[in-house]
Image: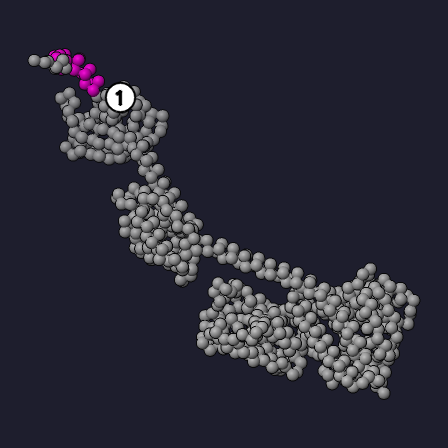
């Protein structure tokens, strides 16, 4: 038989009261919870070591004291505490929160459980205390964490959705997500992620399968990049989607899915707009290079044509010339004039455009240039074109003041747009006219037409009815050009009925033919002719001599200044623009300073190429090649005239 040694110890304790008390005290102090033994008045009869350590008082200081010693002033109702003790003595266990104060003055909360007990033969109240500071700190940390999460969730710049991991239904949405989809967050709740985030565009079916897989596997973080979906108002939005598992203490064990929606639509649009502008700048750079090349070619061609026209017109006025020779010379003159028009068309369209370079122009000529420039499109070589052009050149002048090159670009754009609207072929009508104080040009097609919604955005930048093939800049730029000319551009169209674009411009002033023919001729004068091309000098010299004038020639501006110093009888100066040593611009500046009353004529291949400052220093600008009749009329305006005999 085995005997437990502890039985002997217990038996000895029962025979020795001092040993019994010591044993009880050891067990009492070993308990981890603070324990207070109280009488009916609430006074402490005994406390254990944990109670001493909790409050900082010695056992002797606590024995005989009451709750008022340990209560936090202003936070504890001693009477209510004693009522809890009374009820405990009556057999009603009490549990309540109580603010205590440490001996050093520190206040802290605790939870008190009071029950009835026996202490050495008398009824007592046993108060067992639990320090609440750790629990409160833990709860406060949870609350703070929840608050931080809610702040991050609500203030995030990306859209955020919380969905049930099993059903895929939305449980919560932040402010940005509600804005993205155009509704209140309550409207998003209970919607299915697979429907709200449904992809659009090409490959939508395959991408929908990717979305379903990402939602189904809620435990694995997943990213879906370059995602297109429909946002507020059905607008196409480009986003990156992120799927992450979400741990939540209040989810009851159910899985949660956090979905982030990074919207980069505006960045994508800006990038596309930048690429479009860069592409347009590259095109403009090529046009500038083409313009410089065209300017050089045109200068040489114009000099050659000036010589041809001068010799032809001088010879044609000879009385001794046979009729057949005169007819041949007239043919040469017509061909030369046509070549000059072609050079001007190419030069005006390809040159660098200056919006402020305005000059008198004829809208009929602008339209004719546009029709000629687009001929390879509507009437390609070989006659395989599918479009019919209905256009009759205007029989009357349509004077305007503006930038002919820019207006030509507008008409070219309208013609090309009309052809694009008729991919299967059709009729393109171009007409011009004069109405009151305005002139107009109309471009109409028999194509597919434009709906009312598209018409409202037709002149907006980057809006196009041509899909990916269109940049959406043509009509926007055209609208700006017409606006700078104080004009208007309008459209009339219906789906399936074609479209009609009309450009209205203010009527300019011009010199009528009747006025020109009635002008008297200039009396014989001394004219200084300045040009670095000897062929041009000789040809223009012959024209001036044919008109009865004396010609003084100079090869460049420096030589011209010498001639002006030598010949005080010079009545008028005609100078080229591009010359070595001293060019036409330098010569004009010096002449306007030294001989301000001397009439000055500037010759150039294209009138708009002349700088605005040069225009102010000249009386008139002549465009090469120069016609004999035009030269005669110009001299008559600047020199004293003599009656027609």
Which quarter of the picture shows residue 611?
bottom right
- Image coloring type: one colour
Q: Name the residue under label 1.
A: 49
Q: Position of residue 318 (x, y in %)?
A: 83, 82
Going by the picture, which residue comes out furthest to the bottom? 645
Q: Where is residue 250 in the image (x, y as percent from the top left)?
A: 28, 44
Dividing the picture into quadrants, the one containing residue 453 is: bottom left
User: Picture coordinates of residue 523 (x, y %)?
Assistant: 86, 80
Residue in front for this viewpoint, 304 or 448: 304
Q: Quadrant of the C terminus?
A: bottom right
Residue closest to the eye, 576 or 260? 576
Q: In this view, does 19 lie above or below 481?
A: above
Q: In which quarter of the image is the N terminus?
A: top left
Quarter assignment of residue 179: bottom left
Task: Using residue 643 as the reference point, say whether residue 452 is left or right of it.
Answer: left
x and y, in percent, of residue 100 in the image: 30, 30
Identify which residue is drawn at 63% across, 76% down: 368
Image point 31% across, 56% down: which residue? 191
Task: Report crowding for label 1: few under 14, some 14 to 19, many 20 or more residues within 10 A (C-alpha).
Answer: some
Q: Is residue 31 above or below residue 594?
A: above
Q: Residue at x 35, y 52 (%)?
A: 210
Query: In this rendering, does residue 43 appear at all?
Result: no
Q: Magenta stretch containing residue 97, yes or no? A: no
**Range drawn in magenta:** 8-27
Q: Residue at x 38, y 55 (%)?
A: 178
SS label for mark 1: helix
- The answer to whether residue 97 is seen in the rendering is yes
């Amino acid at each position: 038989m085995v005997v437990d040694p502890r039985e002997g110890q217990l038996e000895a304790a029962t025979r020795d009261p001092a040993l019994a008390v010591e044993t009880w005290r050891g067990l009492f102090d070993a308990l981890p919870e603070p324990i207070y033994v109280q009488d009916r008045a609430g006074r402490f009869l005994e406390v254990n070591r944990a109670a001493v350590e909790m409050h900082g008082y010695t056992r002797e200081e606590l024995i005989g004291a009451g709750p008022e010693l340990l209560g936090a002033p202003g936070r504890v109702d001693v009477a209510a505490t004693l009522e809890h003790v009374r009820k405990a003595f009556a057999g009603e266990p009490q549990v309540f929160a109580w603010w205590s104060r440490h001996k050093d003055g520190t206040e802290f909360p605790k939870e008190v459980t009071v029950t009835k007990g026996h202490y050495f033969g008398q009824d007592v109240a046993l108060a067992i205390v639990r320090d609440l500071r750790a629990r409160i700190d833990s709860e406060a940390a949870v609350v703070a964490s929840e608050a931080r999460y809610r702040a991050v969730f609500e203030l995030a710049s990306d859209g955020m959705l919380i969905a049930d991991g099993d059903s895929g239904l939305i449980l919560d949405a932040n402010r940005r997500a509600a804005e993205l989809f155009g509704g209140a967050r309550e409207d998003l709740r209970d919607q299915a992620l697979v429907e709200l985030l449904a992809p659009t565009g090409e490959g939508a079916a395959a991408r929908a399968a990717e979305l379903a897989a990402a939602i189904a596997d809620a435990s694995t973080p997943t990213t879906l990049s370059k995602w297109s979906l429909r946002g507020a108002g059905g607008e196409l939005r480009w986003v990156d989607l992120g799927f992450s598992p979400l741990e939540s203490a209040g989810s009851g064990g159910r899985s949660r899915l956090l979905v982030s929606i990074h919207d980069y639509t505006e960045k994508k649009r800006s990038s596309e707009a930048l690429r479009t502008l860069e592409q347009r700048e590259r095109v403009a750079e090529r046009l500038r290079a083409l313009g410089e090349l065209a300017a050089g070619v045109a200068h040489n061609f114009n000099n050659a044509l000036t010589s041809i026209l001068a010799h032809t017109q001088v010879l044609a006025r000879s009385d001794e010339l046979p009729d057949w020779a005169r007819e041949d010379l007239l043919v040469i003159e017509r061909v030369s004039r046509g070549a000059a028009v072609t050079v001007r068309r190419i030069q005006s369209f390809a040159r660098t455009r200056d919006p402020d370079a305005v000059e008198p122009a004829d809208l009929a000529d602008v339209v004719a240039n546009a029709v000629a420039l687009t001929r390879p499109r509507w009437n390609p070589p070989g006659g395989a074109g599918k479009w019919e052009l209905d256009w009759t050149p205007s029989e009357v002048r349509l004077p305007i003041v503006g930038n002919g090159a820019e207006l030509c670009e507008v008409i070219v754009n309208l013609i090309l747009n009309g052809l694009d609207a008729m991919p299967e072929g059709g009729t393109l009508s171009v007409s011009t006219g004069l109405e009151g104080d305005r002139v107009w040009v109309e471009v109409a097609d028999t194509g597919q037409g434009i709906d009312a919604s598209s018409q409202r955005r037709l002149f907006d930048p980057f809006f196009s009815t041509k899909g990916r093939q269109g940049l959406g800049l043509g009509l926007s730029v055209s609208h700006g050009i017409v606006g700078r000319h104080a004009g208007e551009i309008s459209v009339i169209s219906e789906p399936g009925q074609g479209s009609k674009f009309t450009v209205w411009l203010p009527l300019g002033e011009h010199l009528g033919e009747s006025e020109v023919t009635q002008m008297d001729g200039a009396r014989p004068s001394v004219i200084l002719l300045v040009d670095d091309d000897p062929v041009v000098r000789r040809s223009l010299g012959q024209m001036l001599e044919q008109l009865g004038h004396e010609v003084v020639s100079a090869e460049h501006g420096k030589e011209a200044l010498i001639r002006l110093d030598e010949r005080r009888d010079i009545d008028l100066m005609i100078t080229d623009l591009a010359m070595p040593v001293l060019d036409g611009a330098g010569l004009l500046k010096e002449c306007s300073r030294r001989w301000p009353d001397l009439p000055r004529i500037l010759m150039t291949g294209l009138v708009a190429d002349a700088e605005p400052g040069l225009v102010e220093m000249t009386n008139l600008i002549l465009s090469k090649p120069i016609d004999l009749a035009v030269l005669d009329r110009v001299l008559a305006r600047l020199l004293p005239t003599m009656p027609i005999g």
